[in-house]
Amino acid sequence: MNVRDEQLKEFLLDAGLVTRSDIEAAIKKTQAKNVSLGDVLVSESKLTDDDLRRTQAYLLGIPFVSLKGQKIEFEVLSMIPEPIARKHNIIAFKKTPSELEVAMLDTNDLTAIEFVKKKVGLKILPRLTDQESMKAALVQYQKSLKAEFGDIIQKEAVSVKALADQSEDGEHSEKDLKELAEDLPIVKIVDTLLNHAIIQGASDIHIEPMETQMVVRYRIDGILHDAMVLPKDVAPGIVARIKVLSNLKLDEKRLPQDGRFKIESAGERVSFRVSTLPTYFGEKTVMRLLRDAASGFTLEGLGFHGSGLERIHSAMKQKVGLLLTTGPTGSGKTTTLYTMLDILNTPEVNISTVEDPIEYQMPRVNQTQVKSEIGLTFSSGLRTLMRQDPDIIMVGEIRDEETASLAINASLTGHLVLSTLHTNSAAGAIPRMIDMGVEPFLIVSTVNVVIAQRLVRRLCDGSKERYTLSKDELSRLEKIVNLDRVLATLKEEKVIKPGDDWDTIDFYHPKKSDECEDGYKGRLGIHEVLKMSSTIKELVIKGATAAEIETQAKKEEMLTMIEDGVYKAAQGLTSIEEIFRVVSE
């Protein structure tokens, strides 16, 4: 059933939801583009998706339900598998002996309705709902699965104990380990740990052997959380299973090993980068989760804004030069580089990279993996790339003098070069390159922009506590942040009204909720973007320190990372305490 455009038009005009002139303009577009009136009004922001759904539900006589704040029994929720629920936006929320009520964003999705009907063998009663309700209901899968996974792992761990006691001295031969890795309980435990990590949005899994037990921890939004404690007896089997998946040597326990494997979970392809390390109580295993769907990011979505964003776009338009991102491990440098590559990736250019490791696979980009054991290093790979007629080159990391020299030469000879450095600030990249043996005159001739960044946790929209800064808090903040510059930026970018001041701007504390255990969910970047201006070039030639370069950059309107953090806290995206946790002055 569909709502006719004429029927929708009359209702919207009667209800006063859309003006007559907007309706008439939209009708002309429906005829030109052969789309529905509702779709045009939503695309032009004259009507929200949810308002359109509510209107359609009313006109069609379909009940509208809100699931926000409603706890759905897991027995009912799980009648529709999570991948189907996510793909088709359909949630089972109420059941009787003969009927199942399902909430949907599109009640015309007959394929989903028919699938659920065949699976459960009940009469299906479709109900319309809004996006917020759907989002809240889908989150309940995670919590239910978390509880369910915990039970599965503990149950299977008991089954493994008997297998682990095969050897009297606790040592296992390669044959024993292979059998252990293929045993059903071990396979179930490892599969469950991997799926659970994907559902929880973890970036890393740590499997750590202790004296009497094995601890599994997930890094979620930059913070490590204990996920599971297992008996020590299951450790050899779990490590063996991970080694089998990543094609590592089963009987090598004295030396570190690195590997990789890929799985598909809930329609999402995820690569796991595996590292094993011998420790006193056994082998510690760490797995980095790399989601294959890396495209679709934007610089704005990563947290860039204002003059910093303009400087990056300006540098990306250059045909030559060096564009650097800096920060410690796990600060999002690689994601920023890939986002820039995604923007630059057009049919007119040849993009080549040399990386260690290749974290995301990108179409139409020639990516080379460093293999130092056979002599393929960053420097040798970069030297070869120069003979491959590239327009744009990405070097995963500048680690030594040779790679730095080659990157500089590449940028001097008609290439745009993107790379990363390990420094704490944007200004610190200059002395770091000089330490590597790069001449100052080469730095000022090639470097266009240096980005420094960190990742901070994002506040949950539905659960945060509003407050305004007290005089004491403002005075403490003023000692380390130029509040006048931050306020001017907030006004210039129209985040706040021209008359607003620090005593009227709302800030937020994290607040725990069912959806967000510690009040945060997801992360965003805080940045500083240093442009190599003529004044800064002169300072570099004179041998200025990082502090002197940063002082000049501030005069040229560069927000420091901590100032950008306060800017984003004033937007309600993160909290002041989170900024100070991540960036220490």
Image (cartoon, helix red, strand yellow):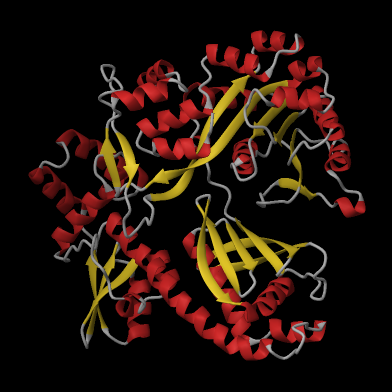
Vertical comparison of 477 with 331: above or below: above
The image quarter containing residue 535 is top right
Q: Position of residue 307 (x, y in %)?
A: 50, 21
Q: The C terminus appears in which quarter of the rendering?
A: top right
Question: Does residue 386 appear to the left or right of 534 in the view shown?
Answer: right
Report if residue 539 is visible in the image.
Answer: yes
Q: Position of residue 324 (x, y in %)?
A: 68, 30
Residue at horizontal 24%, vertical 59%? 68
Extreme residue toward the front, this view: 211
Q: Position of residue 347 (x, y in %)?
A: 67, 39
Q: Nearer the viewer, residue 290 or 546?
A: 546
Vertical comparison of 554 with 428: above or below: above
Q: Position of residue 361 (x, y in %)?
A: 67, 52
Tally the marks. Answer: 0
Residue at horizontal 57%, vertical 47%? 295
Residue at horizontal 87%, vertical 33%? 402
The image quarter containing residue 415 is top right
The image quarter containing residue 395 is top right
Report if residue 319 is visible in the image.
Answer: no
Extreme residue toward the right, this view: 375
Question: Does residue 365 appear to the left or right of 139 in the view shown?
Answer: right
Vertical comparison of 83 with 233: above or below: above
Extreme residue toward the left, this view: 14
Q: Nearer the viewer, residue 202 or 27?
A: 202
Q: The N terminus appears in which quarter of the rendering?
A: bottom left
Q: Nearer the viewer, residue 381 or 249?
A: 249
